[in-house]
Amino acid sequence: MRRYLIKRLLATIPMFFLMTGVFFALQNYLPGGPVQEALAQIRGQNESSRGDRSFSVEDIQRLKKDLERQYGLDKPIHVRYWNWVKAVAVLDFGDSTTTRQPAMETVASRIPVSLGFGIPGFFLTYLICIPMGVRKALRDGSKFDAFTSFMLFLNYSIPTLVVSVILLLVFCTDRVLPGGAIFPLGGIRSDDFDSLTAFGQIWDFVKHMFLPVVASLIGGFTVMTMLMKNSMLEVIRSDYIRTARAKGLSERQVVFKHALRNAILPLMVGIGGFLSSFVAGSIVIESVFGVPGMGLQFLDALSSRDYNIMMAVVVIQSLAIMFGQIISDIAYVAVDPRIQFK
């Protein structure tokens, strides 16, 4: 196991360069950029202060060269990438081209929001899907199995955007429920957040994040539950389960001591994804509920071509994905020690 982990950790190095290098190259081919944004801002300021007078072609070309030199865009792409890698090695992601603040500080301010959005969704998904999948497998073909399957696939067929809007209209406005809005309309805190007690601040944060977490659960709820059910069905029909029952073990011992441990293995594949879910969130859900997480921040940076912010988010997301896969392998061993990595 130790040797395997060392190999996996070493493998993350070229993978990191591959993931960040590809994105670094792709963003350079996107239309627009910090130079174009700065030129447009300068033109606007010039027109407002000088009337109808505008820059000549020579002025624009000179300004463009100066801005490219300022942003380091006058060098070849491989030189720029290598300079970026050397800066990232000392945790210097540069400044945001829109806010002029350090990019890492700007991104780091969104991490607590994404943690509050991703952690509950991840744990609730597993805590609900595993028991439901097991029960559906044990009662395969029953009315409970048929009803829950219908509800799950009905839920799966509704887009996340539609679910988010419905939750927003039902629980955050006074148009549907007679008692009025139950949860805040958006954001992550109330206007009087700073004046609340410690418990009041926690409760206020929970109220703001409850519906976004519920909306995030709906996306992978059906897949996880059906995966657990099918895996459990396959295991409980195995010969060693029949042998355990023939030995006189109780159904509880057969299910939870012998069957569940092997049936849960397919779900371990995605357990490493909790790291990426912590920092990524959902752009759709964050946009609808006004949650200022990293997903929405990346979308804003993409629209304004804020390359430093985009690359900071990509680095965090890439590291989360790679280390999440290693955690998945460790979880495999924890569940089934028979696995031999060699």
Image (cartoon, grey):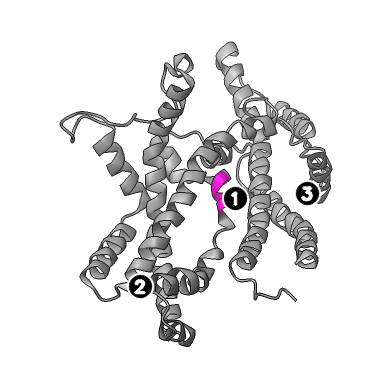
Q: Amino acid at mark 3?
A: Ile
Magenta segment boundaries in residue numbering: 274-278
The residue beneath circle 3 is 77
Q: CA distance from mark 3 to mark 2?
A: 55 Å
The answer to whether 324 appears left or right of 119 in the picture is right
Q: Which mark is residue 137?
A: 2
Q: CA distance from mark 3 to mark 1?
A: 30 Å
At 59% from the left and 11% from the top, the residue drawn is: 49
Circle 3 or circle 1, nearest the eye: 1
Provide the secondary structure element on which disc 1 rests: helix
Q: Position of residue 284 (x, y in %)?
A: 43, 45
Quadrant the N terminus occupies: bottom right
Crowdedness near tag 3: few (<14), some (14–19) or many (≥20) residues, C-alpha within 10 Å: some
The answer to whether 158 appears left or right of 95 in the picture is left
The answer to whether 53 appears left or right of 198 in the picture is right
Residue 112 position by quadrant: top right
At 49% from the left and 74% from the top, the residue drawn is: 258
The residue beneath circle 1 is 275
If you read the primary sequence from the N terminus, does the residue marked by circle 2 or circle 1 appear first? 2
Q: Say above or below: 214 vs 245.
A: above
Front one among 128 and 102: 128
